[in-house]
Image (cartoon, rainbow, N blue to C red):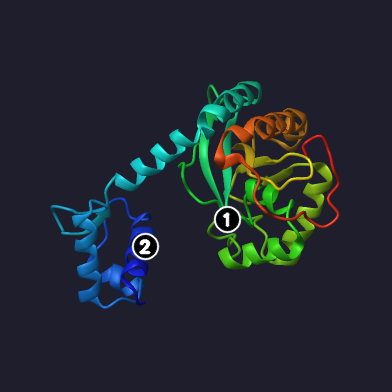
Amino acid sequence: MSGALEKSLAILEYLVAYPDGVALVKISTDLNMLRSGCHRTLHELIGYGYVRQMPQKGDYALTTKMASMGLSFLSRSGVVDIAQPVIERLARATEELVRLAIVDGSRLTLVAKAQGAKSGLLYDPDMGIDLRLSCSAAGHAWLMTLQEDEAAEYVSKQGLGSPRQFGPNAPTSLKALQAALRLHAKRGYSIIQDAYAPGMSSMAAPVRRKGEPATGVLVIAGPSARLTAKNMARFGPELMSAADELAMSGSASPLLKAANVGTWGNRVDSGAD
Protein backbone atom coordinates (compact mmCIF):
# COMPACT_ATOMS: atom_id res chain seq x y z
CA MET A 1 0.00 0.00 0.00
CA SER A 2 1.45 3.36 -1.03
CA GLY A 3 0.48 6.99 -0.55
CA ALA A 4 0.07 8.78 2.76
CA LEU A 5 -3.61 9.57 2.20
CA GLU A 6 -4.42 6.00 1.13
CA LYS A 7 -2.69 4.63 4.24
CA SER A 8 -4.47 7.06 6.53
CA LEU A 9 -7.91 6.29 5.11
CA ALA A 10 -7.26 2.54 5.20
CA ILE A 11 -6.34 2.74 8.89
CA LEU A 12 -9.36 4.88 9.77
CA GLU A 13 -11.74 2.49 8.00
CA TYR A 14 -10.04 -0.51 9.62
CA LEU A 15 -10.28 0.90 13.16
CA VAL A 16 -14.07 1.30 12.85
CA ALA A 17 -14.35 -2.44 13.59
CA TYR A 18 -12.25 -2.19 16.78
CA PRO A 19 -13.82 0.27 19.25
CA ASP A 20 -11.77 -1.26 22.10
CA GLY A 21 -8.51 -0.78 20.20
CA VAL A 22 -6.20 -3.05 18.23
CA ALA A 23 -2.45 -3.68 18.30
CA LEU A 24 -0.02 -2.15 15.84
CA VAL A 25 1.20 -5.54 14.62
CA LYS A 26 -2.34 -6.63 13.70
CA ILE A 27 -3.11 -3.37 11.90
CA SER A 28 0.09 -3.50 9.85
CA THR A 29 -0.36 -7.20 9.04
CA ASP A 30 -4.03 -7.00 8.06
CA LEU A 31 -3.46 -3.89 5.94
CA ASN A 32 -0.21 -5.19 4.42
CA MET A 33 1.78 -2.19 5.65
CA LEU A 34 5.34 -1.99 6.91
CA ARG A 35 5.17 -1.76 10.68
CA SER A 36 7.33 1.36 10.80
CA GLY A 37 5.20 3.16 8.21
CA CYS A 38 1.99 2.08 9.91
CA HIS A 39 3.30 3.33 13.26
CA ARG A 40 4.21 6.67 11.71
CA THR A 41 0.80 7.10 10.09
CA LEU A 42 -1.00 6.20 13.32
CA HIS A 43 0.90 8.86 15.22
CA GLU A 44 0.15 11.43 12.53
CA LEU A 45 -3.55 10.58 12.94
CA ILE A 46 -3.15 10.92 16.70
CA GLY A 47 -1.71 14.38 16.12
CA TYR A 48 -4.76 15.37 14.09
CA GLY A 49 -7.12 13.98 16.73
CA TYR A 50 -8.61 11.07 14.76
CA VAL A 51 -6.86 8.24 16.64
CA ARG A 52 -5.93 7.68 20.27
CA GLN A 53 -3.58 5.23 21.95
CA MET A 54 -5.08 3.18 24.76
CA PRO A 55 -3.35 3.67 28.13
CA GLN A 56 -3.04 0.00 29.15
CA LYS A 57 -1.75 -2.06 26.21
CA GLY A 58 -0.92 0.76 23.84
CA ASP A 59 -3.50 -0.40 21.29
CA TYR A 60 -4.93 2.11 18.82
CA ALA A 61 -8.58 3.19 18.53
CA LEU A 62 -10.60 5.92 16.88
CA THR A 63 -11.58 9.04 18.78
CA THR A 64 -15.09 10.47 18.44
CA LYS A 65 -13.88 13.15 16.01
CA MET A 66 -15.12 11.38 12.87
CA ALA A 67 -18.42 10.47 14.53
CA SER A 68 -18.88 14.08 15.58
CA MET A 69 -18.16 15.27 12.03
CA GLY A 70 -20.68 12.80 10.63
CA LEU A 71 -23.41 13.81 13.05
CA SER A 72 -22.75 17.48 12.37
CA PHE A 73 -22.95 16.87 8.63
CA LEU A 74 -26.27 15.01 8.96
CA SER A 75 -27.65 17.73 11.18
CA ARG A 76 -26.72 20.47 8.72
CA SER A 77 -28.00 18.48 5.73
CA GLY A 78 -31.53 18.60 7.14
CA VAL A 79 -32.22 14.94 6.35
CA VAL A 80 -32.97 13.95 9.95
CA ASP A 81 -35.31 16.91 10.50
CA ILE A 82 -37.23 15.97 7.36
CA ALA A 83 -37.30 12.22 7.92
CA GLN A 84 -37.73 11.83 11.69
CA PRO A 85 -41.44 12.71 11.93
CA VAL A 86 -42.26 10.29 9.09
CA ILE A 87 -40.10 7.55 10.60
CA GLU A 88 -41.59 7.97 14.06
CA ARG A 89 -45.15 7.87 12.71
CA LEU A 90 -44.45 4.64 10.81
CA ALA A 91 -42.75 3.13 13.88
CA ARG A 92 -45.82 3.89 16.01
CA ALA A 93 -48.16 2.40 13.40
CA THR A 94 -46.16 -0.83 12.98
CA GLU A 95 -44.71 -1.07 16.52
CA GLU A 96 -41.39 -2.09 14.98
CA LEU A 97 -37.99 -0.52 14.31
CA VAL A 98 -38.02 1.86 11.33
CA ARG A 99 -34.81 3.09 9.72
CA LEU A 100 -33.78 5.37 6.86
CA ALA A 101 -30.74 4.55 4.73
CA ILE A 102 -29.26 7.04 2.27
CA VAL A 103 -27.81 6.13 -1.13
CA ASP A 104 -24.19 7.31 -1.20
CA GLY A 105 -22.40 6.26 -4.37
CA SER A 106 -22.45 2.46 -4.33
CA ARG A 107 -23.32 2.29 -0.62
CA LEU A 108 -26.38 2.43 1.60
CA THR A 109 -25.77 4.08 4.97
CA LEU A 110 -28.19 4.15 7.90
CA VAL A 111 -28.75 7.73 9.09
CA ALA A 112 -32.00 7.81 11.13
CA LYS A 113 -34.24 5.48 13.12
CA ALA A 114 -37.26 5.23 15.41
CA GLN A 115 -38.16 2.31 17.69
CA GLY A 116 -41.86 1.44 17.76
CA ALA A 117 -41.76 -1.80 19.75
CA LYS A 118 -43.00 -1.28 23.30
CA SER A 119 -42.08 -4.69 24.70
CA GLY A 120 -40.49 -8.01 23.83
CA LEU A 121 -37.34 -8.38 21.72
CA LEU A 122 -36.06 -5.04 20.39
CA TYR A 123 -34.08 -5.13 17.16
CA ASP A 124 -31.80 -2.11 17.15
CA PRO A 125 -28.56 -2.38 15.12
CA ASP A 126 -25.87 0.28 15.21
CA MET A 127 -26.46 3.38 13.14
CA GLY A 128 -24.02 4.69 10.56
CA ILE A 129 -23.08 1.28 9.17
CA ASP A 130 -22.97 0.51 5.47
CA LEU A 131 -25.56 -2.18 4.82
CA ARG A 132 -24.73 -5.42 3.00
CA LEU A 133 -26.60 -5.00 -0.27
CA SER A 134 -27.04 -8.67 -1.15
CA CYS A 135 -28.87 -9.80 1.99
CA SER A 136 -30.55 -6.74 3.53
CA ALA A 137 -34.08 -5.59 2.75
CA ALA A 138 -32.71 -2.08 2.23
CA GLY A 139 -30.11 -3.36 -0.21
CA HIS A 140 -32.73 -5.30 -2.16
CA ALA A 141 -35.10 -2.32 -2.26
CA TRP A 142 -32.39 -0.13 -3.76
CA LEU A 143 -30.93 -2.74 -6.11
CA MET A 144 -34.35 -3.46 -7.62
CA THR A 145 -34.45 0.16 -8.89
CA LEU A 146 -31.17 -0.23 -10.80
CA GLN A 147 -30.33 -1.76 -14.13
CA GLU A 148 -29.33 -5.39 -13.74
CA ASP A 149 -25.69 -4.92 -14.72
CA GLU A 150 -25.31 -1.93 -12.37
CA ALA A 151 -26.84 -3.85 -9.46
CA ALA A 152 -24.53 -6.80 -10.16
CA GLU A 153 -21.53 -4.48 -10.24
CA TYR A 154 -22.31 -2.97 -6.84
CA VAL A 155 -22.92 -6.37 -5.26
CA SER A 156 -19.75 -7.83 -6.78
CA LYS A 157 -17.74 -4.88 -5.50
CA GLN A 158 -19.04 -5.31 -1.95
CA GLY A 159 -19.27 -9.11 -2.02
CA LEU A 160 -22.15 -11.44 -1.31
CA GLY A 161 -23.07 -11.75 2.36
CA SER A 162 -22.24 -15.25 3.55
CA PRO A 163 -25.08 -17.16 5.30
CA ARG A 164 -22.59 -17.98 8.04
CA GLN A 165 -21.93 -14.30 8.73
CA PHE A 166 -25.47 -13.05 8.19
CA GLY A 167 -28.63 -15.20 8.01
CA PRO A 168 -29.26 -18.71 6.63
CA ASN A 169 -31.41 -17.34 3.80
CA ALA A 170 -28.81 -14.87 2.50
CA PRO A 171 -28.47 -15.28 -1.31
CA THR A 172 -25.33 -17.19 -2.27
CA SER A 173 -25.26 -16.28 -5.97
CA LEU A 174 -26.07 -13.31 -8.20
CA LYS A 175 -28.64 -15.46 -10.01
CA ALA A 176 -30.56 -16.12 -6.77
CA LEU A 177 -30.34 -12.44 -5.82
CA GLN A 178 -31.61 -11.31 -9.23
CA ALA A 179 -34.61 -13.65 -8.97
CA ALA A 180 -35.47 -12.16 -5.58
CA LEU A 181 -35.12 -8.60 -6.91
CA ARG A 182 -37.63 -9.28 -9.68
CA LEU A 183 -40.19 -10.48 -7.14
CA HIS A 184 -39.60 -7.42 -4.96
CA ALA A 185 -39.96 -5.07 -7.94
CA LYS A 186 -43.37 -6.51 -8.85
CA ARG A 187 -44.52 -6.02 -5.26
CA GLY A 188 -43.08 -2.51 -4.96
CA TYR A 189 -41.08 -3.23 -1.81
CA SER A 190 -38.64 -5.89 -0.59
CA ILE A 191 -39.26 -8.59 2.02
CA ILE A 192 -36.59 -10.78 3.61
CA GLN A 193 -36.66 -13.29 6.46
CA ASP A 194 -33.57 -14.81 8.12
CA ALA A 195 -31.31 -13.30 5.44
CA TYR A 196 -29.61 -10.36 7.19
CA ALA A 197 -29.66 -11.98 10.63
CA PRO A 198 -31.05 -15.27 12.00
CA GLY A 199 -34.55 -14.88 13.42
CA MET A 200 -34.99 -11.39 11.97
CA SER A 201 -37.28 -10.08 9.24
CA SER A 202 -37.30 -6.78 7.39
CA MET A 203 -39.02 -5.00 4.54
CA ALA A 204 -38.02 -1.87 2.66
CA ALA A 205 -39.25 0.56 0.02
CA PRO A 206 -37.14 2.90 -2.10
CA VAL A 207 -37.44 6.64 -1.55
CA ARG A 208 -37.83 7.97 -5.08
CA ARG A 209 -40.03 10.20 -7.17
CA LYS A 210 -41.64 8.60 -10.20
CA GLY A 211 -39.18 8.44 -13.08
CA GLU A 212 -36.22 9.44 -10.88
CA PRO A 213 -33.51 7.36 -9.19
CA ALA A 214 -33.83 6.29 -5.56
CA THR A 215 -32.05 8.53 -3.06
CA GLY A 216 -32.77 6.47 0.03
CA VAL A 217 -34.58 3.44 1.42
CA LEU A 218 -37.13 3.21 4.23
CA VAL A 219 -36.94 0.01 6.31
CA ILE A 220 -39.13 -1.80 8.85
CA ALA A 221 -37.29 -4.49 10.83
CA GLY A 222 -38.02 -6.81 13.72
CA PRO A 223 -37.94 -10.39 15.03
CA SER A 224 -39.44 -12.93 12.60
CA ALA A 225 -41.79 -14.28 15.29
CA ARG A 226 -43.46 -10.88 15.40
CA LEU A 227 -42.74 -9.39 11.95
CA THR A 228 -44.32 -12.28 10.07
CA ALA A 229 -45.01 -12.51 6.33
CA LYS A 230 -48.67 -11.71 7.07
CA ASN A 231 -47.78 -8.61 9.07
CA MET A 232 -45.31 -7.43 6.43
CA ALA A 233 -48.02 -7.70 3.76
CA ARG A 234 -50.28 -5.65 6.04
CA PHE A 235 -47.60 -2.98 6.57
CA GLY A 236 -46.75 -2.73 2.85
CA PRO A 237 -49.14 0.12 1.93
CA GLU A 238 -48.08 2.19 4.97
CA LEU A 239 -44.41 1.65 4.17
CA MET A 240 -44.81 2.73 0.55
CA SER A 241 -46.91 5.74 1.55
CA ALA A 242 -44.22 6.88 4.01
CA ALA A 243 -41.50 6.38 1.37
CA ASP A 244 -43.58 8.49 -1.05
CA GLU A 245 -43.89 11.23 1.57
CA LEU A 246 -40.13 11.29 2.08
CA ALA A 247 -39.55 11.40 -1.68
CA MET A 248 -41.83 14.41 -2.07
CA SER A 249 -40.23 16.35 0.79
CA GLY A 250 -36.66 15.19 0.15
CA SER A 251 -35.72 18.03 -2.17
CA ALA A 252 -35.19 20.17 0.95
CA SER A 253 -32.13 18.08 1.83
CA PRO A 254 -29.09 17.57 -0.45
CA LEU A 255 -28.84 13.96 0.75
CA LEU A 256 -32.30 13.13 -0.58
CA LYS A 257 -31.93 14.78 -3.97
CA ALA A 258 -31.85 12.51 -7.01
CA ALA A 259 -28.57 11.08 -8.30
CA ASN A 260 -27.86 9.64 -11.74
CA VAL A 261 -28.75 5.94 -11.65
CA GLY A 262 -30.89 3.71 -13.86
CA THR A 263 -33.93 1.48 -13.42
CA TRP A 264 -34.09 -2.25 -12.70
CA GLY A 265 -35.11 -4.56 -15.54
CA ASN A 266 -38.84 -4.50 -16.25
CA ARG A 267 -39.78 -2.57 -13.12
CA VAL A 268 -43.52 -2.41 -12.54
CA ASP A 269 -44.54 1.08 -11.39
CA SER A 270 -46.63 1.22 -8.22
CA GLY A 271 -47.73 3.79 -5.70
CA ALA A 272 -44.29 3.50 -4.10
CA ASP A 273 -42.65 5.15 -7.08
Give the vertical position of 20 relative to 32 (above or below).
above
Q: Which mark is residue 240?
A: none
Estimate the spatial distance between the alpha carbons at disc 1 and disc 2, rounded to whole Å.
17 Å
In the displayed structure, does residue 187 sit left or right of residue 134? Answer: right
Tell me the kind of residue under disc 1.
Gly
Q: In this orientation, does residue 37 appear?
A: yes
Mark 1 secondary-structure assignment: loop
Crowd around label 2: few <14 · some 14–19 · many ≥20 (10 Å): few
x, y percent for residue 271? 81, 34
Give the vertical position of 175 relative to 272 (above or below).
below
Tell me the kind of residue under disc 2.
Leu
- Which residue is rendered at x = 86% and y = 46% of the image? 268
* Viewport quadrant of the N terminus: bottom left
In the displayed structure, does residue 248 sit left or right of residue 32? Answer: right
- The count of marks equals 2
Front residue (pair 69, 126): 69
- Which residue is rendered at x = 78% and y = 55% of the image? 264
Q: Which mark is residue 9?
A: 2
Q: Residue 97's image quarter? A: top right
Front residue (pair 205, 117): 205
Q: In this orientation, does residue 194 appear?
A: no
Mark 2 secondary-structure assignment: helix
Residue matched to label 1: 105
Crowd around label 1: few <14 · some 14–19 · many ≥20 (10 Å): few
Looking at marks 1 and 2 on the same chain, the residue that comes earlier in the sequence is marked by 2
- Which residue is rendered at x = 24% and y = 67% of the image? 41
In the displayed structure, does residue 81 sit left or right of residue 179? Answer: left
x, y percent for residue 273? 78, 39
x, y percent for residue 191? 72, 44
x, y percent for residue 69? 36, 43
